Image (tube, rainbow, N blue to C red):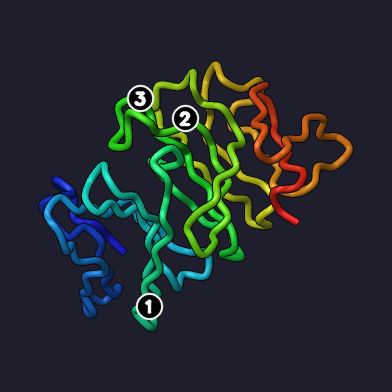
Amino acid sequence: MFCHEGPWHELDRIWTIRTDGTGLTRQHTRQIDMEIAGHEFFSADGRTIWYDLQTPKSEVFWLAGVDLATNHRTRYAVARAHWSVHFNVSPDGKLFAGDGGGPHSVAAPGNGQWIYLFTPGPIGLTATPLVDLSAHDYGLEPNVSFTLDGRWAREPALPGLCPQPGGPVRLRPASPRIASPVVPGRPNRSGSDFAVSQAVQ
């Protein structure tokens, strides 16, 4: 996979090509004026490309995916308050995470500055806020990812926000050594490691 760089609203960004140079394929074609798609990433099994889609830019938000074998397309609606600069998917493909948006992002004003855990459903992505990033200016974008076992989400070092920058966020019931569970709907603002006690059963 590769992307054409440039103004997102003026080009089709997401492409694939085989290592021998054959099979050049556009994976998303813009359909309307000011539509943008980008920050593309693979599912863990390599079968799906996921990406941020806005139809149009800064107004309607989606997490979109294309199955590379079947060309089946999926769109999950994302509320403006939960839009993220970057998304990622768990290894089993059942959950997503996002890093929220900064004060000058395409979703501002109105976007949240959180690390989010997303659960897909029939009306879109349901967000559970995990880590408060309100003190972060997004000059260094968090770009959250999952561990290989799918039990933790990690963000790169965020200086000044966490006692242990880059520390993991627990996604399943906490082990006894993790002391601060987060109850869904009640975000933890302590800036330490975070446990989500009931978000994932």
- The secondary element bearing badge 3 is classed as loop
In the rendered view, tell whether residue 94 sits above or below residue 24. above
User: Disc 2 residue type?
Assistant: Gln
Residue carrying label 2: 113
Residue carrying label 3: 103
Q: Residue 100: x percent and y percent?
A: 45, 37
Q: Residue 144: x percent and y percent?
A: 51, 42
User: Disc 3 residue type?
Assistant: Pro
Residue at the (10%, 52%) spot, across then down: 10
Residue at the (54%, 59%) spot, across then down: 120
Q: Residue 199: x percent and y percent?
A: 69, 48
In the rendered view, tell whether residue 160 sits above or below residue 90. above
Residue furthest right in the image? 176
Near mark 1 (Cα within 10 A), the count class, few <14, some 14-19 or many ≥20, is few
User: Disc 1 residue type?
Assistant: His
> In which quadrant will I find the N terminus?
bottom left
Where residue 13 sits, quadrant-wise, is bottom left
> Is the C-beta separation of discs 3 and 2 under 8 Å?
yes
Where residue 153 sits, quadrant-wise, is top right
Of pointers 2 and 1, the one earlier in the residue sequence: 1
Residue carrying label 1: 72
